[in-house]
Image (cartoon, rainbow, N blue to C red):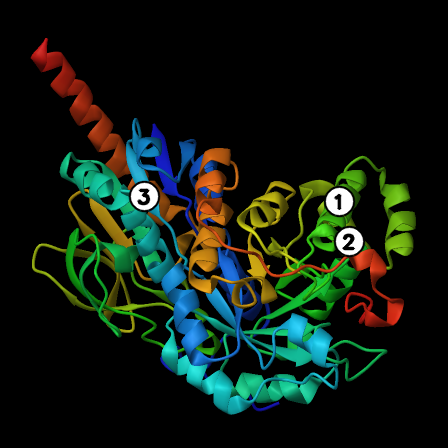
Amino acid sequence: MKIGILAVQGDFEAHAAMLQQLGAETREVRTATDLDGCDGLVLPGGESTTQLKFLQEEGLADKIVKFAEHGGAIFGTCAGAILLAKDVKHPAQVSLNLMDMTVVRNAYGRQIASDVVSGPTVLKKGPLEMVFIRGPVIERAGPSVKVLAEYAGKPALVQHENIMAATFHPELTDDTTVHEHFLSLAKARVKKSANGGKSST
Amino acid sequence: MDVKKPNGHGNGSKGSNEWRVKVGLAEMLKGGVIMDVTNAEQAKIAENAGACAVMALERVPSDIRKEGGVARMASIKVIREIMNMVTIPVMAKVRIGHFTEAEVLQALEVDFIDESEVLTPADEENHIWKHDYRVPFVCGARNLGEALRRIAEGAAMIRTKGEAGSGNVVEAVRHMRAIMSQMKKLTTMRDDELMREAKELGAPLELVRQIAKTRRLPVPNFSAGGIATPADAALVRRLGAEAVFVGSGIFKSSDPEARAKAIVKATTHFEDPMAVLEAHEELGEAMRGLDVRQLAEKDLLQTRGW
């Protein structure tokens, strides 16, 4: 299984280290062709304004939307979640519009408000450790969006079919729960396309 | 010290969790370009060009070099205007050892503090004890020993010093090569040799032993000081820098907007010569550079701090 990681700017190495630890092959994605052959894609933390400009200029934005439409698994953390959200506030910003939710940028304040906290999750017993760094808040999650973890009464980890988004950074902890869940989405896709191959022959 | 409580996140973690969010922000800046700006308008240009953060300061290093005088923390009014103008992280510089300037910037809630040799040092013996702050610090280094001393004091990011305001990348290259080769050397040493090497480097043994295993700094390793062109940025990235700072190089060039964009492009695609070539197309004149060998010892900024 091959997971692409958008390596324009941000903590792409931390995601790569965690995914490799879980046995996945990773590839840094900087151009549209880098995404060919990937089963999943991670949009890492970083600066969403910087990343967005790059996606548009490199023609990656359209390619990622198509990747999602064809069932590719996508996981956005922090800035990545902002890129996936349908609506972005504070200030408003265009996005890939792949998840029906409203996200407020830098909602906790500046870096001085960044912190390590924990919140309940459906993915495992006990609380999930969450590293927030100048994090956004999911103000509204659409009816089709599943909430997998919460912090302070707000959705912090959400999923809609093959798309996942976190407002925190599971890649900066030792807990692999969230990435394992993401790999299970990517794996489901591999199986599906393998079956599809068989039935067509 | 009475640190402002984080809004929205309870009381704010202390100790190792506090350290994790400081290094965490540095991680988020990897692969990006941090640009020196002296007003809100420049900050907006930098953000629009794809900067991942801006460094607010009163004068860019090349002007400090030209005009002389004491260079201090920037005016609060200017920093605040910059913070209000952009959504990307805002950094600001304090003088080496000036811990009350640092307290002021923390109270202002800048996102990162640069304890910088570009400003006139306030203390020629001691650097700031950076563990005392909730805001992360970046510090300059010319070699591995200096980098590890700053990390031991609590720096969450290291950048090469280079020779700021020179428009000449030679010193940044020298410093990055020194740090990388000294780390490589540690990986070849026996435990008993590491103690001696720690003494030679003037660095804590614990950090030296850690690098002997991992071959990398425990915090992000960026480059600064003299980067003026897209190819300069790609060069320091190839030598091991995980992101770049560009000071005078952008707003002292003939075409700041285009140059800022081009340097961002080359920093991301540093391994692709075609992309670096594209970044260079249609660029005007770079800032005028200085031959560092012609500078008198007293005019060097990199020798400030230890």
Mark 3 or mark 2: which is in front?
3
Residue A184 drawn above or below residue B170:
above
Residue A113 drawn above or below residue A40:
below
Q: Chain of mark 2?
A: B
Closest to the observer, B10 or B37: B37
Residue B166 appears left or right of B85: right
| SS of the residue under disc 3 | loop
Q: Chain of mark 3?
A: A
Residue A78 appears left or right of B155: left
Q: Which residue is mark 3?
A: A58
- Mark 2 or mark 1: which comes first in sequence? 2
Residue located 27% across and 60% down the image: A82
> Disc 1 and disc 3: Cα gap in Å?
35 Å
Q: Is residue A78 visible?
A: no
Q: What amino acid does circle 1 point to?
A: Met
* Tag 3–tag 2 contact (CB < 8 Å): no
